[in-house]
Image: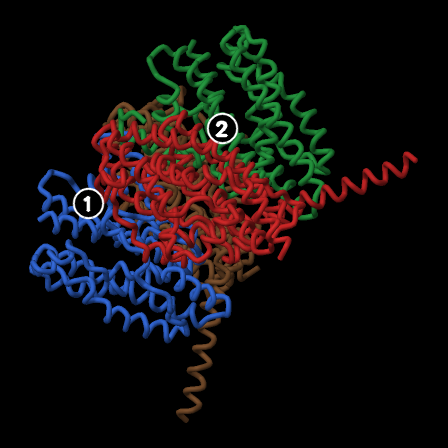
Chain colours: A green, B blue, C red, D brown
Amino acid sequence: KPAFFDWLCRMGDSALILGHRVSEWCGHAPILEEDIAMANTALDLIGHTQMWLGLAGEVEGAGRSADDLAYLRDAAQFRNLKLVELPNGDMGLTLMRQFLFDAFHYDLLTRLTRSASPRVAEIAAKALKEVSYHLERSSDLVIRLGDGTEESHARMQAALDRLWPYTGEMFADDAVDAKVAEAGIAPLPSELRDGWLATVQEVLGEATLALPEAKADVHLGGKTGRHTEHLGYILAEMQFLQRAYPGAAW
Amino acid sequence: KPAFFDWLCRMGDSALILGHRVSEWCGHAPILEEDIAMANTALDLIGHTQMWLGLAGEVEGAGRSADDLAYLRDAAQFRNLKLVELPNGDMGLTLMRQFLFDAFHYDLLTRLTRSASPRVAEIAAKALKEVSYHLERSSDLVIRLGDGTEESHARMQAALDRLWPYTGEMFADDAVDAKVAEAGIAPLPSELRDGWLATVQEVLGEATLALPEAKADVHLGGKTGRHTEHLGYILAEMQFLQRAYPGAAW
Amino acid sequence: SPEELAFQDRVDNGEKIEPKDWMPEGYRKTLVRQIGQHAHSEIVGQLPEGNWITRAPTLERKAILLAKVQDEAGHGLYLYSAAETLGVSRDELLDKLHSGQMKYSSIFNYPTLNWADIGAVGWLVDGAAIMNQVPLQRTSYGPYSRAMIRICKEESFHQRQGYSIMMKMAQGTPEQKAMAQDALNRFWYPSLMMFGPSDKDSVHSAQSMAWKIKINTNDELRQKFVDQTVPQAEYLGLTIPDENLKWNEEKQGYDFSQPDWTEFFEVLKGNGPCNQERMEARVKAWEDGAWFRDGLTAYSEKAAKRRAAGAVAAE
Amino acid sequence: SPEELAFQDRVDNGEKIEPKDWMPEGYRKTLVRQIGQHAHSEIVGQLPEGNWITRAPTLERKAILLAKVQDEAGHGLYLYSAAETLGVSRDELLDKLHSGQMKYSSIFNYPTLNWADIGAVGWLVDGAAIMNQVPLQRTSYGPYSRAMIRICKEESFHQRQGYSIMMKMAQGTPEQKAMAQDALNRFWYPSLMMFGPSDKDSVHSAQSMAWKIKINTNDELRQKFVDQTVPQAEYLGLTIPDENLKWNEEKQGYDFSQPDWTEFFEVLKGNGPCNQERMEARVKAWEDGAWFRDGLTAYSEKAAKRRAAGAVAAE
């Protein structure tokens, strides 16, 4: 049960933090259609957060709501992947991060629709529809920008190289993953690596981008609460009102 | 007495928020000497904050410490000038803001050393030594960069033009100022304008920069708690620990 | 001219003017200005509200706010499309926005300083916008009228959400109530300004009304807005910052103070609290995004060539 | 060569070598590398601590931290000056830092994740640094030795401040204590790595020790550091994350686990948690500041010309 709780926080926190990052683009995107798409992606991810953290609170059984978990934990209690907390950089970095995550997220949710936990399966089924669109969109943009101008190609390749060492964490199994897998709730992350790599290779190929040769599993630790220096700033901003006005209803 | 408290918060909050902004440069300045100078300026300003807000807490008589005032008020309770909460921009903007404020700060503190309040006079005398150095340094850099390359000149002029509409707030009298002036505690801000303008004109002249023709008193309100959108972000970051761990000792 | 007379007849009969129909140059120009400015307002309007997305106090409020900002961008799309039917591209309009030749609603030059401001923007700003926009559903230009119909539907939803935030704040802790009152204090007069100066000071109004580009006078709409809003404020237990506000039995409406029109013109001239920051944000987004737009264009040109080559090869 | 023998004699007799004295090329090169790396460490070292300046929990802690970061930049200045006496300019050294040819201490590639980390950096990282630096006050090269004397004085002050933060945290609320323990857990082994790999694996050590550029072996210093730190941790009520840690009566010191040297070499190779971000921050500061440095240079050239013209006119 503590493992299940932890795992649900991983799901919810990655959605929450990526949603936060994506939402930072609202009103600042390079084109109106992207303003809309970014807001929409963030909105979906916040919706997933509500479901995952809501269930996490139930599983924990300590009376914490999704909001309590989102707004009243400090960085060391967050379980999101480091990948999703990285600063947005330019639109290329943001889209590449989205694509690398979407490809993983899509496969994971697909597997989760067959989870032994009906609640998990239900959430996954709801989220999958949206994430399937996320992946379609981010793949498409990675391809078009990778195979666009020299500059857009260079930016996308730089983004890929920059993010690559963070991708390994998505597939790194630990004790929590093992327990949840044993219970049939979720696949072992490592089982998703090959499928993910195939998707990524296909899209990168079409995008005329080169698969980095660097190690992918350099930046681990987010799933156990050892984050980058960025997460603290995200939380300070995100949690301000709940922290400054404890107990208020909004 | 409430006016005195308010006025002390204005002094303390401007020092605190400018100190915060300046401290953001630590480790990111264009040259090692500037890393040192920026940290030093921030340090001085935080020192002033401790003195002003400490006295404010005493005057208020509600048992609030300088830390309570700094860390547990929200934006609408802050009384700093809008000028000091603006984002740093490039080093040119940061230095120009510093110069425009220093020139005012120096004259104000000089007058305050003759305050009817011995406590105010004492704090002013301590702060004045440091601020006299701040003004020397910022004037010098404004001159050198204004009369440097074409690019540095253009950046300094742009910084001046951008900041000018925020300078009027330093000299805008209101009821609080009037009461504090009546009590002989501080001069009316408006009395400082001519001296300030003379200093500014002299330095800008030597810097080969043009005095803006735009209005100076466009962005008022900081002194009564109507700030820019930036202050909320500053406070969310600055106050995080105190807000997240209420009552803890550090 | 006979064309003008025929055109005016159609307008008078309540017929919709469609893109391919003949229209007076002044009509076209006025529409482009009005629709363009409205579109720009939707885009710039993302900024003050977007300012609180990352700090929304609950996940649900965050989701609602995201959805709202997304809607606004969507409204921008409809409106730019409507403007395009008049022969002016979105990029041309954006260029004019960025160079300062075209305006956006001055209300967005006011900052959002606390969470209740998000409520106040929905309640007051969207409320005033709806008041302006509802009659425009009957405007004479077809594409504009249809865009306004879609937009009004969503806006009234936004207004209710804004009011719901205000309700929570006004019924909340003393701090929350203070924020709500502060938000009302700051947004009241700027909202009244959204209807524009009194019609007697407005040169273009008469012609626009004849063309049914404008349906009601500014003063009519402002009065209607005040009459609708005062009871809502009372229900919230908040005080409208106007000592002269009182019910006038005779006119069956409220008497109220005019906003400070000097401030209005100052903001128009660029001296509002956030004019510079709003434009900086938009221009930066545009300039930083140049490589992105160029990349997409280059790709679609390549793709078109590949398709053409494929077609040739297939022959 | 006879010069080398004479040089070694002077070193052996404890004489200081000064900039204008003859010295072996290897000695000069090793010193430049060592002093330069140390200077770079001070500069990069501003970043992990600077990360908490804006979030320091009290005004006093903020002031202390600012003063500390300022001191570090100052140490950078002393050390670049010491390196300059060996004929290499600060800009050359910085170029090598930015291009990755020169390193800085790997400890700064670890992130500061909670406020207790600022305590741990002072206590452990400065503690380890002092352990390394105290003997270097007796190093053979005069300018380096004198720089180290000034630096050590300030560093020991920093270490006490760091310990004082740890004390507050360890004696604070359960959350604070957890942060303190977490900080110790994360910084313990990286601090042990600061002394470098075991001397038996180090090629350069023997020569450096003969030249008195290095005074103690890495293992000696590491042992000393552990022996000093364990009782301090006990006093704080914190647990050092090492199951094998225990007092060895015979050697009158602690037995302890070696850090993971694979990790050490990975971080050296650039795969530490923050290598990329640290370098990005420094390179960005440098590049963004080019106009600033150019401006100052241009001004001083103009000023020099004006002075020269004035001097000519005065003749």
Which of the chains bears the disc numbered 2?
Answer: A
- Three-letter residue code for mark 2: Leu
Q: Are marks 1 and 2 in contact (CB under 8 Å)?
A: no
Question: What secondary structure is marked by label 1?
Answer: loop
Asked whether C84 or B169 is in front, the reply is C84
Report the residue at 51% width, 7% height from top.
Answer: A117
The span from disc 1 to disc 2 (Cα, nearest Å) is 42 Å
Q: Which mark is residue B55?
A: none
Residue B131 lies, in percent from the top left, at 25, 61
Question: What secondary structure is marked by label 2?
Answer: helix
Question: From the viewer's perspective, is B223 left or right of A163?
Answer: left
Snapshot quadrant of residue A240? top left
Report the residue at 45% width, 43% height from top.
Answer: C45
Q: Quadrant of the N terminus of chain D?
A: bottom right
Q: Which mark is residue A43?
A: 2
What residue is shown with label 1? C243
Residue C314 lies, in percent from the top left, at 90, 34
Asked whether A193 or D34 is in front, the reply is A193
Snapshot quadrant of residue B236? top left
Question: From the viewer's perspective, is C264 left or right of D102?
Answer: left
- Three-letter residue code for mark 1: Glu
Q: Is residue C301 visible?
A: yes
Question: Do discs 1 and 2 belong to a common subunit?
Answer: no
Report the residue at 35% width, 69% height from top.
Answer: B140
